[in-house]
Structures are given as structure tokens and as C-alpha cells.
């Protein structure tokens, strides 16, 4: 999918529904989209906030894994 489009959709959702019951899921999707767009530093910061806000979230293991994989994967050479 398109990471930038996902981020925009998630931003609009947060604006329209700031206290949504889906806040946890929206934040998780935002972190994944940030990783997809290469914004690993921002994704890492958002993950730290997510961990503080949702310490028992069942989404944490997959988010940590995605971020860890994005840091360890070699960057493909530019052409």
C-alpha cells in the first residue's frame, strides 16, 4: 500500500475522532505506515509513546518486530 496516503487518512481520522475507541489501532497503523515510508526515527518515537500509553497492547510485539526489522534490513542502493 501507499504509506503516505495511509498517513494522511490516519491523520484525518485522528482529527475527526480524537478520542475514538480505535485510537490504539490507529496509532499502530500510523507506526507501520511511518516505517513503510522510511520514517523510522519518527516511528520509533511513536512506538515509545504507544508503549507508555498502551503497555498491555496485544499489538506491541508485532510493532516492535516491524521496527526492529526495518532497522536491521539493508537499504537498497539508489539507482
Image (spheres, rainbow, N blue to C red):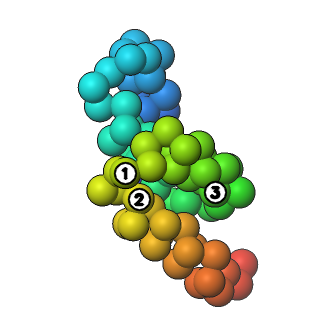
Image quarter of residue 26 = top left
Task: Find numbered disc 1 in the image and state the secondary structure of the residue it sits on.
Answer: loop
Q: Is residue 79 left or right of residue 49?
A: right
Q: Above or below — where is 14 with respect to 63?
A: above
Secondary element at image label 3: helix
Residue beneath the point at 29% across and 31% down? 22
Query: Is label 1 or label 2 in front?
Result: 1
Mark 3 closeness class: few <14, some 14–19, many ≥20 residues within 10 Å = some
Question: Which residue is located at x 44 percent, y 23 percent?
Answer: 14
Can residue 37 be seen by looking at this rendering? no
* Label 3 sits on residue: 44
Q: In which quadrant will I find the C terminus?
A: bottom right
Contact, mark 3 vs mark 2 (Cβ under 8 Å)? no
Camera-side residue: 40 or 56? 56
Residue ID for mark 1: 56
Question: Residue 8: x and y, percent?
Answer: 48, 32
Measure the C-alpha gap from mark 1 to mark 2.
8 Å
The label on residue 60 is 2
The image's mark for residue 8 is: none
Amino acid at each position: 500500500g501507499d504509506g503516505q496516503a495511509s498517513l494522511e487518512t490516519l491523520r484525518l481520522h485522528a482529527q475527526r475522532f480524537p478520542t475514538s475507541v480505535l485510537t490504539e489501532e490507529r496509532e499502530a497503523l500510523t507506526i507501520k505506515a511511518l516505517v513503510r515510508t522510511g520514517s523510522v526515527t519518527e516511528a520509533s518515537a511513536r512506538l515509545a509513546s504507544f508503549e507508555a500509553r498502551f503497555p498491555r497492547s496485544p499489538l506491541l510485539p508485532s510493532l516492535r518486530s516491524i521496527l526492529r526489522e526495518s532497522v536491521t534490513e539493508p537499504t537498497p542502493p539508489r539507482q
